[in-house]
Image (cartoon, rainbow, N blue to C red):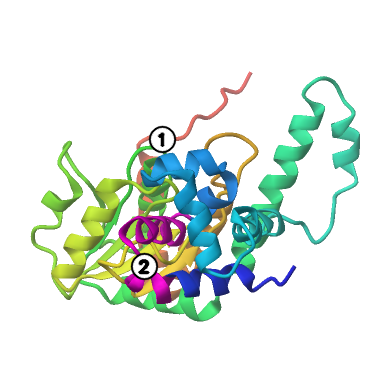
Amino acid sequence: MDPTLKTKTIEALKREAATMPPRLKLVAKYIVDHPLDFGLDSIRETARKCGVSTYSLVRLAEQLGFSGYEELREPFRHALVSSTQLSERPAWIDSVRHSGELGPIQAEASLNAMGIVQRSLERLAPEDLERAVALMLGARKVYLTAVRSTYALAYYFHYVGRMALPSLELIPRHMNSAIDDLSDADEQDVLMALTFTPYSREVIEACKFAARRGTKIVLVSDFDVISSEFEPEVALIASVISTHHFGAYTGVMAVLEVLLAGLVRRGGTAASKRIQRYETLRQQNNAYWVRKKT
C-alpha cells in the first residue's frame, strides 16, 4: 500500500470539506481530527461518534473516489500497524509468547511498547526539538497543562524540567481551570500542552484561549491537526497505539525525555548549578532512604 495514501486522504478531506453537505462535513472533520479512532473503530462506532448514519460514511467514501467505506478506512488501519513495527524483533519475545496464559499478551504488549518508542523517536525532527527548546528557554513563563491520565506525564516533566527551566509552571493549580491560570499570559509566554486521542476538552480550550492572547503553543500529541481554531508553533508527535483500550504512553515518555535532555543541555551552567542545589537540598533534608548498617 502507498504509505502516503493516509496523508493524501486527509489533505483531500481538508480541501473538499468546505463544499460538502453538512453531514459529510461533520464526518470529514471527525476523520481529520481523530485519524487513530477512525482507523480502529467499526463503521457503526464512527457513525455514532459523528452523530450521522452509516450511509453518510459510505457517501463520503464514494465522493472521495473510493469504491467503498473499507477502502477509505484501509490506509488509516494500515498506518496503525506500520507505526508500531520494530526494526528488529528481540529473540526473547518468542520465549515469552509461549510462557503461560499471559505470555502472548505480554509479548504483544512488549512489542507494541518498543515499537511506539521507536516510531515516536523516529518522528521527532531535530528542527522541531530545536524550536521547542528555544521557545521554552526564551519565554518569560512556560505554562504546562494536561488532565486525567496525561497529567501524570506533565507532573513528571514539571518535576524534572523546573530544575533546568525555573519559569516552568504546571497548571491548573488549586483545582482551577487552566484558563484561570492563563489569565496573565501573553505573547511573551509559552503554553506546553499534552493531549492525546480522545482529546481533552479542557486542554483544547486552554490552547484556544492562549492562541487568542498571542501565547505560543508547544503541542505534544499524537496528531498535529487537532483544531482549526489554533495552530501550535511546534508539534511534537508521539504514537500512543496500545494493545488495550487506553493509550500507551511509553512513546510519549521517550519524546519528553529527549526534550528534557535538550533543556538541560541548553540551560548550560545555570541549569547544572540549579540541579546541584536541588540535589544538595534533598541530601541535607534526608530525602533519600539509606539502608542502616548492620
Query: Does any portion of residue 256 appear in the rendered image?
Result: no
In the rendered image, the vertical position of residue 286 relative to residue 154, given as above or below:
above
The percent position of residue 194, horizontal first and vertical second, equals 38, 54
Query: Does any portion of residue 26 appear in the rendered image?
Result: yes
User: Residue at position x 85%, y 52% from top?
Assistant: 89
The amino acid on which the numbered mark 1 sits, given as a three-letter code, is Ala
The percent position of residue 166, horizontal first and vertical second, equals 28, 61
Q: How many marks?
A: 2
The percent position of residue 247, horizontal first and vertical second, equals 53, 42
Res 287 label: 1
The percent position of residue 88, horizontal first and vertical second, equals 84, 58
The quarter of the picture where residue 185 lies is bottom left
The amino acid on which the numbered mark 2 sits, given as a three-letter code, is Met
Q: Which of 124/167 is in front?
A: 124
User: Residue at position x 69%, y 58% from top?
Assistant: 78
Q: Is residue 167 left or right of residue 182?
A: right
Q: Is residue 245 left or right of residue 33?
A: right
**In magenta segment, residue 190:** no
In the rendered image, the vertical position of residue 164 relative to residue 89, given as above or below:
below
Secondary structure found at label 2: loop
The residues tagged by marks 2 and 1 sit, at their Cα atoms, a distance apart of 61 Å
What span is in magenta? 14-34
On the image, numbered disc 2 is attached to which residue? 20
Considering the image in quadrants, where does the N terminus appear?
bottom right
In the rendered image, the vertical position of residue 125 relative to residue 91, given as above or below:
below
